[in-house]
Image (cartoon, rainbow, N blue to C red):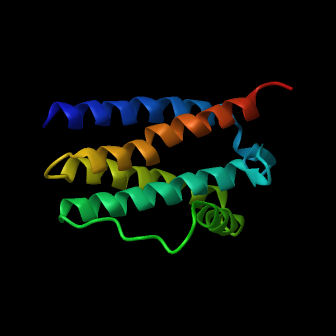
Amino acid sequence: MSDLRTEQAAREAESWAAFASALERIPRERWEEEGILPGWSVKELLWHMAGWLQKCARNLERFARGEVEPASEQTVDERNEELAAQAHGMTIDAVFRGLMSARELVVEGWNALPNVDERAVEELADETYDHYDEHRADLERFSAPA
């Protein structure tokens, strides 16, 4: 295993642990309460995270095959709105299972990469630890006493 692979995996795991810890401080009874972000509940935020992790896992699989990420037909905002809408019809448990499964796919995809290059690091950073840190702050604000 290369040092870069190990460093990035450790960074992802550390950031994930902080994100998961912040999430644990919010009772599940509040996960459908709007306000973590404008118009979003914790449930919608978590499905948003799951959706971007799924994209990351697909891209890591492509990179392993020597392919490039295809051009998206959606803007980031359109994709975010689509994910939030999907979350509306889902149970809290389904959203949480989806999030955990998507993260597992990313970790497996990262470990399976034959070569870790700049685009793989950028993909991992954007969709995991940078994203976890961004939304960990939202979770912390949401769980703080009023």
The location of residue 109, given as percent across then percent down, is 27, 54
Seen as rendered, the residue at the extreme top is 145
Visible residue check, residue 98: no
* Viewer-side residue, 56 vs 120: 120
* Image quadrant occupied by the N terminus: top left
Q: Nearer the viewer, residue 106 or 32?
A: 106
What's the residue at 52%, 42% (across, down)?
131
**How far across and how far down the image is residue 44, in percent?**
67, 55
Where is 72 relative to 44, above or below?
below
Q: On the rendered structure, is 127 left or right of 111? A: right
Residue at the outermost bottom position: 73
User: Is 119 displayed left or right of 51 in the figure?
Assistant: left
- Which residue occupies 69% across, 69% down? 89
- Residue visible at 14% across and 35% down in the picture: 2
x and y percent of residue 102 in the render? 43, 56
Residue 17: x and y, percent?
47, 31
The C terminus: image quadrant = top right
The image quarter containing residue 93 is bottom right
Give the vertical position of 18 relative to 30 (above or below): above
Can the viewer see residue 69?
yes
All told, the count of numbered labels is 0
Near-viewer residue (22 or 5)? 5
